[in-house]
Image (cartoon, rainbow, N blue to C red):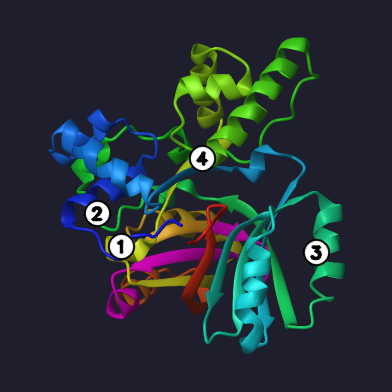
Amino acid sequence: MLIMRQALDETDRRIAAALVASPRASWREVARCLGLSERTVVRRVALLYADGTLRATAVRNPARFAHLVPVVLRIRCRPNRIRQVAQALARRDDTVWVDILGGGDEISAVFFLEGPEARNSLLLRDLPATDAVGSWTAHTLLRVFPTAFRWTAGLLSPAELAALAEPATSAPDPGPASPSPPPTQSSTQHHDVDTALIAALTEDGRATYTDLARRAGTTALTARRRLESLLAGQVLRLATELDLALLGAQTEALLWIAVRPGALQETAQTLSGHPHVRFCAATTGPANLVVAVAAADLDALYTFLTDAVGPLEAVTAIDVTPLLATVKRTGLLRH
């Protein structure tokens, strides 16, 4: 059984922060960025991955998969059953995030549902049949603003962050993918390789190109080219999963923000670039922007609300819900 660290020293925290910002950065790049020897990085990072403190994975971009329905649910539960419900949701293959919120009677979960039928089954059959669930609200994710994925808990300077290889997924979201051309034999082969690569990267986001090639039945050169294409096309993003408290972020919260529609894009881009913001997406519903914040403490969260959100004139309402516990993140169950 893996036992995650309860604390990291300053060097390990900075290494972890670099890998959060650039999940497939080479050890040489990490060493150069942080001013460490490559041997030190290799020795320390091997231990962090070995004990499960760091885990590398990949997450699909639902905007590039026409059949996926990305939904955020706020689920009200009986407090004495909330952990059971959260764990049951986390065991589903179609959940990406599962968090326990607020006063211990609410769950937030991000689903990538396999089409409208799966969505309807969840909302009209599965949730109503769960007696511990009282009510829920559903928000469809319309657009994710990926600049927030370069979060480093303030452990890296702007110059150090710039020194890392910036993943293609941090480019501005161009919007929904263009319609695909009719499939050819070559495109079908690419699809098969890409599907195998995504599955392999979900299991291990730092798998070598040789391992990826073996899983996809192709060459290492082709695996590298196809991965670069997937990242450049924002088909998936690479992620490093860890307990953010290890990086000094002791306070996490979800912000459900109502913004005037004409200013939604500008407001989202402004917030997604803030150092405390881990996730930012436009949604349907009365709160049309959901923002995940990770701050050092409650005072830092308060300062973010007053200094970063407060001056935004287009914000008409905000609901702040602290995170009490994380059960699943980036598709991985928390130990």
Who comes first in sequence, dot 4 or dot 3?
3
Amino acid, disc 2: Arg
Query: Residue at position x 45%, y 37% from top?
Result: 171
Amino acid, disc 3: Leu
Mark 1 sits on what residue? 246
Indicate which label's residue lies in the foreground, 3 or 2.
Answer: 2
Q: Estimate the spatial distance between the alpha carbons at disc 2 and disc 4, rounded to whole Å.
A: 22 Å
Who comes first in sequence, dot 3 or dot 2?
2
Mark 2 sits on what residue? 13
> Could you say where residue 161 lies in the image, as x and y percent from the top left?
26, 42
Mark 3 sits on what residue? 122
Would residue 287 be visible to someone looking at this image? no
Which contiguous range is marked in magenta?
281-302
* Residue 235, above or below 69: above
Circle 3 packing at 10 Å, graded few (<14), some (14-19), many (20+), is some
Query: Residue at position x 35%, y 58% from top?
Result: 274
Who comes first in sequence, dot 1 or dot 2?
2
Circle 4 packing at 10 Å, graded few (<14), some (14-19), many (20+), is many
Callout 1–callout 2 Cβ contact below 8 Å: yes
SS for callout 4: strand
> Could you say where residue 195 lies in the image, as x and y percent from the top left?
66, 30
Who comes first in sequence, dot 2 or dot 4?
2
Q: Estimate the spatial distance between the alpha carbons at disc 1 and disc 2, rounded to whole Å.
A: 7 Å
SS for callout 1: helix
Looking at the image, residue 30 sits to the left or right of residue 74; the answer is left
Would residue 206 be visible to someone looking at this image? yes
Callout 3–callout 2 Cβ contact below 8 Å: no
Mark 4 sits on what residue? 237
SS for callout 3: helix
SS for callout 2: helix
Indicate which label's residue lies in the foreground, 4 or 1.
Answer: 1
Q: Nearer the viewer, residue 144 or 200?
A: 200
